[in-house]
Amino acid sequence: MDRLAAVPTDDLAARLSAIAGLREVLPSAEAAGAASARGMLGRLTVVEADAFSLDLRGEGDAATLIPILHRAGAGGAILLPDDRARVFGEDRFHRFAEARPLYSLGDDWVVVLAPPLRRALAAVRRVASGPAASRRALLAAPRAFLREELGDDVDDTVLESVFRETEAWSSRVVGLGLWRKRVLPWVPLATTDWFGPETGGSASGAARPRGGIVVDGSPVPLSASEAAALALRVEAAISQGRPAVTVEIDGKQVELPADHDTLAALHAAEVAAMGRESARPTSKEPEEAEALLIRANEEALDVEGEVARRPASPSGLPAPLATVPKPHQAEGIAWLQRAWTAGLPGVLLADDMGLGKTLQGLAFLAWLRAGMASGAIPRAPVLIVAPTGLLENWRAEHDRHLAAPGLGRLLPAYGRGLAEIRDAGPDGRPALDAGAIRDADWVLTTYETLRDYDRDFGRIRFAALLFDEAQKIKTPGIRLTDAAKAMNADFRVALTGTPVENRLADLWCIVDAVHPGCLDDLKSFSARWERGDDPGRLATLKATLDRGVGGFPPLMLRRMKEDRLPDLPPREDRVVAENMGDVQRAAYDAAVQTARGDARPGAVLEALTRLRAVCLHPDPEGSADDASFIATSARLRVAARALDAIAAAGERALVFLDDLAIQSRLAGVLQRRYRLPSTPMIISGEVSGRARQDRVDRFQSGPPGFDVMLLSPRAGGVGLTLTRANHVIHLSRWWNPAVEDQCTGRVLRIGQERPVTVHIPMAILPSGSRSFDENLHALMERKRNLMRDALLPPTPTRGEERELLERTLDSA
């Protein structure tokens, strides 16, 4: 309410944005009897959008661009219900010549556009009224087009947060063409008629559609168009990381899992309804090719990587390598050389975090460049693809580990370097100077740039292609993954410490990018290996990847820190429990009460998210002073005591939490508490790659004494070396223990010289009943232990999520 009162009366968009925040907290306040909403405030629904994706309706010159609004803070979820989304995308957006700050959607619904989103949609609106060729150019490379429209002053991180890729842009190269939706079925639909004679018709005598799906034992009859529409919703949910969509069965909203099994069933239902012949894609070629189309290896094995021995080149460490590698790194470099000489199309270097995958990759590429200089290997550029935030880290690691000339002349295909090689394609689309790429010695770019300019990169034959943090290409069927698989490279190396991040199909997709066909097609792989979390069976899969066959080197090399770095300083884990105070306990009880009896779709994840937030802090936006802000949270009290001891010892700490608002406030609290000369540095998704590396450098090279940095687990948990810190505080826990281990790996890695302490604060109940924090910790430890022994997916399953909630509610 204070925020609303502070907004000028003539800034309607800002006032409605404040009302949207108020409306979000009203339901829980009303349930607790602390507030009531009457009149317009009780009826009005205000939603704030800060990201969008695009759809295309119609064909040919009549095709219309349809923007779909998202909420980045909710994991990129689609913002509006289907009916309101249609009102906005098909009517209100096109009704006005310019993008507006807010739109009325009828029936007391209002959507407010965040300023960066409004600027991007203004460019889309101009294109929507222009020639069909402009619309096709936008659809061919949307982010590249928007980057052209918005100018080079727009940071890549901002652009990535505003525009969301969905399967609508998905497309191994069979040519150029318009991307068509792919379905990834690997569980065949039963051929029996699920509905039986009693559901064969309706009371009016109209025949019901033949086919459909079964959800929790209940039949859902679907026509062809209904099945296709529902499949699109499921595809969007998969790409956004949402676990489910909802369908209506007999007037009730039922949760439908958002996974590829569901897509398989929907595709089969569509085929059954419209006939197999009419369900086949048309053979008519589009007028203009817009993306590289690949053989996907998803439903059947369409392409296999060729194995052909390459010219022998002297093995051993390359002359430019200025850093003496550790024994396991020298083994890794030799393994890469053997794999290249043996003629493998590619390999997966899956060493644990902190074992120096970057050094091994650079040393191998330097060996290749030396072979080119001697004439033993044909000359061609090498390409390194990395997340935006790690590009400057790659340049710094190159200069640190390789003496001049290193890998030779660098072409930085990002930021200003990208702007310098931009060109215009013959069809008006944004393009790159392929000659500049071909003439470089090594090229450094992002996954998103590779996707946006796939045709330009695809024209170049690269001697080697290295994918850093290769879990970026773990999702089959989206354009970013397909663009990576479409590249023309003689040898590919994938680097990742987490080859299985969410599900076992992640591993299949990464391996398919470096050695197509090695793990069969996706349908067969899933049927064989994803039939349940059997550690014995998964250990067998890992063993098949770890050992070579027929005299060839193994496809995968995976070593763990505890096995390969015996001299690494010791690690101590301190799990510290603290009783909740009265305010936090009241908020916890309210969250528990809200969760009880809530059978709505998505209620389990919503309740867990609410409990997780309350256990971090019950009132993060309160106006309490610094001491009260800390005292109100059991976790913060534990963290503060740990930081007091760290400061007294003159040591340094990393604090991981993903709530950006609490990050910002905590930075000020810590500066005042420890009388720091400046606010502690923050690394989050809102920090650009260059600024991120600058902050890492400042932290690593700062004067002796206490310092602390705040990081988001996703943005700061990969690719960074922060060994000046020897303490890690996991203030908020990530659901996935692999992600949490990545965060700890920023400190516990080569270069660390002091013992490392990992602090895990937990908010517990004074009654002695097990709290949410305790139940989550037990689940994560169980998943972590299984993950270390086999390639078990670390993300909790829906069943484990439900079990976590039930245990928490039963203990409250």
Image (cartoon, helix red, strand yellow):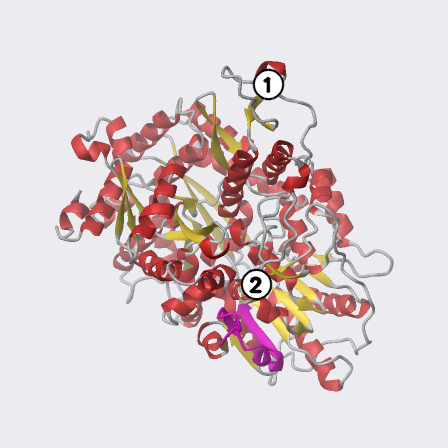
Q: Is residue 504 visible?
A: yes
Secondary structure state at the residue bearing disc 2: loop
Left or right position of 387 against 284: left
Q: Position of residue 683 (x, y in %)?
A: 40, 60
Neighbor class of circle 1 (other Cα within 10 Å; few <14, some 14-19, many 20+) is: some
Q: Residue at x 35, y 52 (%)?
A: 50
Q: Is residue 504 left or right of residue 414?
A: right
Q: Which residue shows up at 47% across the image and 20% down it?
A: 250
* Quadrant of the rendered image containing residue 99: bottom left
Q: Secondary structure at mark 1?
A: loop
Query: Is residue 649 at all visible to an observer of this figure?
Result: no
Q: Quadrant of residue 783?
A: top right
Is 646 colored magenta in this rendering? Answer: no
Count of marks, rendered view: 2
Q: Is residue 116 left or right of residue 566?
A: left
Which kind of residue does numbered mark 2 sit on? Glu
What crowding class fits label 2: few (fewer than 14 Cα within 10 Å), some (14-19), or many (20 or more)?
A: some
Q: Amino acid at mark 1?
A: Gly
Q: What stretch of residues is rendered in magenta?
A: 423-445
Percent across and percent down for residue 670 are: 30, 56
Seen in the picture, residue 1 relative to 493 is either above or below; the reply is above
> Looking at the image, is 405 positioned above or below residue 572?
below
In the rendering, which numbered label is found on residue 200?
1
Q: Nearer the viewer, residue 425 or 485?
A: 425
Residue 25: percent from left, percent from top: 27, 37
**Are the residues at dot 1 and dot 2 in contact (C-beta closer than 8 Å)?**
no
Dot 2 corresponds to which residue?
A: 288
Of mark 1 and mark 2, the one earlier in the sequence is 1
Q: Residue at x 16, y 31 (%)?
A: 39
